[in-house]
Image (cartoon, rainbow, N blue to C red):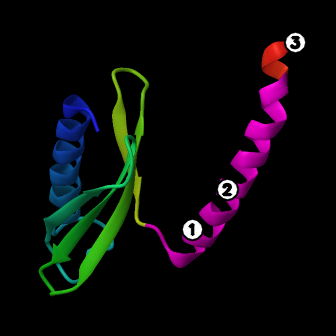
């Protein structure tokens, strides 16, 4: 991961923690605060962030980098359903790449 992208990821992790630590935030019924435990790079453009909540529980978000308008990190908190769906995406993307390859030479 390039240094600039890694720095943006660290900043995003801190921003996410601050946002979810807002005790007046909608759906923050337990007045939880979040702190960053670990940022785990998965590839050049994906990572997970592990948070510890003030309740002692943990939360994890999946982050992905988009190279638009100077580059930005987006995120969501995945469920098992998301993971199952992404397993299918891997196979489908491979099929798309195979289908497109020959079109590079026409």
The CA distance from mark 1 to mark 2 is: 10 Å
Q: Is residue 29 visible?
A: no
Residue behind mark 3 = 106
Residue behind mark 2 = 89
Res. 32 image quadrant? bottom left
State the image coordinates of residue 80 (x, y, percent, origin top left): 53, 77
Magenta segment's dominant SS is helix
**Quadrant of the image for the N terminus?**
top left
Above or below 40: residue 93: above
Residue 17 vs residue 62, the one in the foreground: 62
Task: Report the mark closest to the observer, 2 or 3.
Answer: 3
The CA distance from mark 2 to mark 3 is: 27 Å
Compared across the picture, whether 40 is left or right of 43 comes to left
Q: Can residue 100 be seen in this view?
A: yes
Above or below 22: residue 69: above
Task: Report the mark closest to the observer, 1 or 3.
Answer: 3
Residue 32 vs residue 101, the one in the foreground: 101
Residue behind mark 1 = 82
Q: Is mark 1 on a helix, strand or loop?
A: helix
Res. 45 image quadrant? top left
Q: Residue at x 15, y 57 (%)?
A: 18
Choose the circle earlier in sequence order: 1 or 3. Answer: 1
Instruction: Categorize mark 3 by other alpha carbons within 10 Å: few (<14), some (14-19), many (20+).
Output: few
Residue 54 vs residue 93, the one in the foreground: 93
31 in magenta: no
Compared across the picture, whether 43 is left or right of 24 comes to right
The CA distance from mark 1 to mark 3 is: 37 Å
Q: Which residue is drawn at 78% across and 29% down?
A: 101
Span shown in magenta:
78-102
Choose the circle earlier in sequence order: 1 or 2. Answer: 1
């Amino acid at each position: 991961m390039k240094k600039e992208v890694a720095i943006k990821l660290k900043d995003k992790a801190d921003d996410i923690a601050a946002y979810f630590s807002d005790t007046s935030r909608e759906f923050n019924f337990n007045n939880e605060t979040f702190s960053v435990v670990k940022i785990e790079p998965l590839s050049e453009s994906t990572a997970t962030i592990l948070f510890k909540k003030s309740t002692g529980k943990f939360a994890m978000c999946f982050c992905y980098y988009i190279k638009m308008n100077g580059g930005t990190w987006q995120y969501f908190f995945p469920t098992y359903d998301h993971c199952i769906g992404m397993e299918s995406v891997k196979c489908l993307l491979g099929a798309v790449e195979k289908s497109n390859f020959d079109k590079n030479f026409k």
